[in-house]
């Protein structure tokens, strides 16, 4: 899914919410689904790709866009404002 398709799908979800055809929970689910689909299909310039952190604690489940696993690990630490080595997690490409 490209960016334009993702935005259109989010707009459709918001339109349905505004018209009363969808409730907030259903709208949230649709938007999350669009975002997850966009992230897993994402192929950025310069070799960027989505990586997901797995493990225990705050890092588990985070998805970041990075050039490689090392950069992905650093981005997770930066997002959580943690020093390297303070969190136990792995990263894998989606």
Image (cartoon, rainbow, N blue to C red):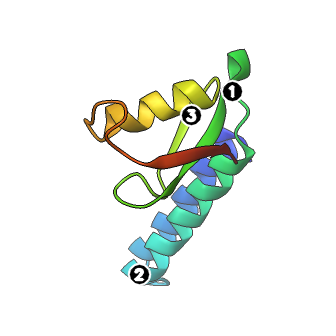
User: Closer to the N terminus: mark 3 or mark 2?
Assistant: 2
Q: Residue at x 44, y 71 (%)?
A: 28
- Number of on-image labels: 3
Q: Residue at x 70, y 48 (%)?
A: 94
- Separation of disc 2 and disc 1 at Cα? 30 Å
Residue 54, image x, y percentages: 53, 55
Element assignment for label 1: loop
Which numbered disc, 2 or 1, marks the residue closer to the eye?
1
Q: Residue at x 40, y 72 (%)?
A: 18
Element assignment for label 3: strand
User: Closer to the N terminus: mark 2 or mark 1?
Assistant: 2
Of 68 and 42, the residue lying toward us:
68
The residue indicated by pointer 1 is 44
User: Closer to the N terminus: mark 1 or mark 3?
Assistant: 1
Q: Are marks 1 and 3 in contact (CB under 8 Å)?
A: yes
The residue indicated by pointer 2 is 25
Of 21 and 64, the residue lying toward us:
64
Q: Which mark is residue 65?
A: 3
Residue 84, image x, y percentages: 36, 30
Q: Residues within 10 Å of mark 1 (few under 14, many from 20)?
A: few
Q: Residues within 10 Å of mark 2 (few under 14, many from 20)?
A: few
Residue 91 relative to residue 16: left or right? right
């Amino acid at each position: 899914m490209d960016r334009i398709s993702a935005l259109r799908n989010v707009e459709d979800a918001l339109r349905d919410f505004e018209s009363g055809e969808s409730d907030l929970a259903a709208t949230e689910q649709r938007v999350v689904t669009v975002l997850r689909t966009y992230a897993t299909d994402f192929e950025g310039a310069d070799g960027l790709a989505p990586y997901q952190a797995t493990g225990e604690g705050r890092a588990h489940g985070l998805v970041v866009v990075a050039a490689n696993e090392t950069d992905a690990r650093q981005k997770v630490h930066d997002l959580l404002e943690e020093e390297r080595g303070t969190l136990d997690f792995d990263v894998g490409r989606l």
